[in-house]
Image (cartoon, helix red, strand yellow):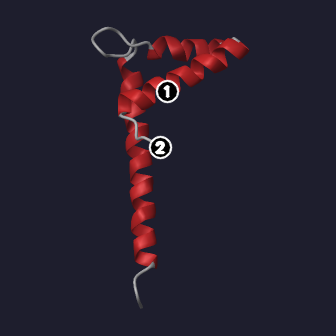
Amino acid sequence: MEKLTEKQAFAAMVLFLESFYERTQSDEIGGLLSDLLMSEDGTTADPAAWDDWMECVRKILVVQQNKLSSSLLDNLPS
């Protein structure tokens, strides 16, 4: 599987939420989608939405790095 950039992953998340919204018509998801709309200059309608997204990306990368570090330590000879 190819790796996605932050913007591609963000777009995939938005597509997922749009699909969910089409099925449920959830007001909360509709509001979230409004905040996530990208303008032509590449910013979200609510700038904090992009910051929140990037914070989540950073958290996932740290978790993955910690798992890698942990597995490396587990494999060291005693």
29 relative to 11 in the view: left or right: right
Q: How many marks?
A: 2
Q: Are marks 1 and 2 in contact (CB under 8 Å)?
A: no
**Which amino acid type corresponds to the residue marked 2 in the rendered image?**
Met
Which label sits in the foreground, 1 or 2? 2
Residue 72 vertical placement versus 26 (above, below): below
The residue tagged with tag 2: helix, strand or loop?
A: loop
Tag 1 residue: 12
Tag 2 residue: 1
Extreme-left residue of the structure: 41
Residue drawn where x is 42% and y is 40% of the image: 2
For marks 1 and 2, the one nearer the N-term is 2
Residue drawn where x is 43% and y is 55% of the image: 64
The residue tagged with tag 1: helix, strand or loop?
A: helix
**Which amino acid type corresponds to the residue marked 1 in the rendered image?**
Ala
Q: Front-most of 75 and 47?
A: 75
Which label belongs to residue 26?
none
Separation of disc 1 and disc 2 at Cα? 14 Å
Residue 17 vertical placement versus 52 (above, below): above
- Quadrant (top left/top right/bottom left/bottom right) for the C terminus: bottom left
Where is residue 51 shown, x and y percent of the image?
36, 29
Where is residue 67 shown, x and y percent of the image?
45, 62
Q: Front-most of 39 and 47?
A: 39
Where is residue 48 shown, x and y percent of the image?
38, 23
8 relative to 33 in the view: left or right: left
